[in-house]
Image (cartoon, rainbow, N blue to C red):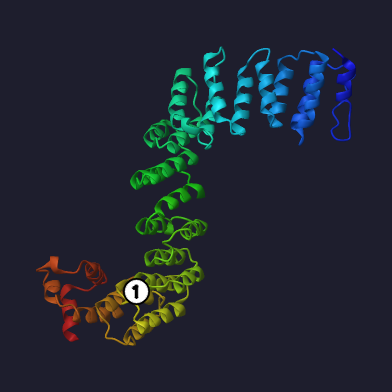
Amino acid sequence: MRNGNIKAILKPSSNFPPREVNCPTPFSLASALQNYINSDHPFHGQKIHSHILKSGFIPGLNVSIKLLILHIKSSCLSYARQVFDKLPRRTLSGYNYMISGYIKHGSVEKSIELVRELCLSSEKPDGYTFSMILKGSTSGNAGLCSRCIGKEVHAQIVKSDVQCDDVLYTALIDSYVKSEGVEYARKVFDLMLEQNVICSTSMITGYMNQGRLEDAEDVFEKTTEKDVVVYNAMIEGYSKSVETAKKAIEIYIDMQPFEVGQQVQGQLTKTEFFTDIKIGSALVDMYSKCGRTDDARRIFDHMPKKNVFSWTSMIDGYGKNGSPNESLALFNKMISERDAVPNYVTFLGALSAWRAGSLNQALEFVMQIPETPNSDVWAALLSSCRLHGDVELAKIAANELFKVMTILSAVVGWAAPNLIPCKWTHHITTLLFLGFGVWSLWDAFNEG
């Protein structure tokens, strides 16, 4: 070996200072190559290879592997392949480095050929080999063979008796999903002892792409630790129609933090459904229940059209978040603008703005409603009485409620319970619970 030339390469320099080696050895060469591999400019280490070739020195396996890695990191795949082909012995690590290099630089078909060669050699692929090739098959550079790679690799995994881990399972599921083999993906998914969030996200995406909402929801429900990514997968799937987009919002209203709500809105703004009245109303409801009434009002004010649900969500949101004045002002605005007709829930939302001890003010509020209060109004006040245990005011509300019930005789006599509107039955039960007998209710009605 011509030590003079090698020593010149290994001398310290201002650009990269490897340790000076007086008598170059395979160890010192491997160490110097590793320094270049770890550097920001690995291609500078190629001059070591050049001088090795000129010196006639035949590198051993360790130095050859370092040269292979160096050329791959330098994006010189042709040189890397030359080193690989001249390896003293083709080891699994050598194969994996070369396969990884091909995949990293978009030569997926060459990496597949090398894996097939590996399967026929004395060495056998491991989980890392299969994971790489599966990821490569979904990178968009696999060409026409991408659709069949998942099955081929899966078959090789079974034949090779490779121990599957989460990384391999995830890569296999992702490959099947992206090649529209969601049924095979689900079989692999169900084999996992613990389904991770990445696999769940892949499965959800696959099902949503095929319009299989129930299957996607099943996977979502079985995912124990949910993150923003898995939620986004559901949101993206739901966002393909108005009805399902509304469902996406409803799912997260009561069970998720505000940040997830922002993810929902962010995803929906990318769709044509964002200005839909159902979506807008659901967003108002979501923000209100998260305590973000300012954000809810911003959505509400920008809605081109509003329905009773929009108004009710905003009114109720103000009431439940400690802004009774805003709640009542909005209710009055709803009445004056006649944009939508308030219902029982609307009145209950407005009345909920009055806290315990203020029910008399609530009664005054009801009496000031421009139109004659209907059964919805009195039923809402009755619910507030139940909430705060105000028996005396409950008598008044019950009396007024029964005045406007055309089926009073059926209610009092219990002769035709099937005629009782179901939304009133719990109010009647409430009154009985508060200490009124059936005939007391009848007397209260007659006194009116």
Relative to the observer, which residue lies in front, 397 or 173? Answer: 173
| Above or below, comparing residue 127 to residue 226 in the picture | above
Determine whether the residue tagged by mark 1 lies in a helix, strand or loop.
helix
| Above or below, comparing residue 331 to residue 140 in the picture | below
The kind of residue tagged 1 is Thr
Q: Residue at x 72, y 27 (%)?
A: 70
Q: Residue at x 35, y 78 (%)?
A: 339
Neighbor class of circle 1 (other Cα within 10 Å; few <14, some 14-19, many 20+) is: many
Quarter holding residue 183 = top left
Determine the residue located farthest toward the left in the rendered image.
415
Q: Residue at x 47, y 69 (%)?
A: 299
Relative to the observer, which residue lies in front, 429 or 406? Answer: 406
Q: Is residue 194 visible?
A: no
Residue 354, image x, y percentages: 40, 77
| Above or below, comparing residue 128 to residue 446 in the picture | above
Q: Is residue 208 visible?
A: yes
Q: Is residue 260 left or right of residue 409?
A: right
Quarter holding residue 83 = top right
Total marks drawn? 1
Position of the C terminus by quadrant: bottom left
Q: In this view, does 190 lie to the left or right of 166?
A: left
Q: Is residue 320 left or right of residue 371?
A: right
Residue 428, image x, y percentages: 22, 71
Residue 133, image x, y percentages: 53, 29
Position of the N terminus by quadrant: top right
Q: Mark 1 points at which residue?
A: 346
Residue 343, image x, y percentages: 30, 74
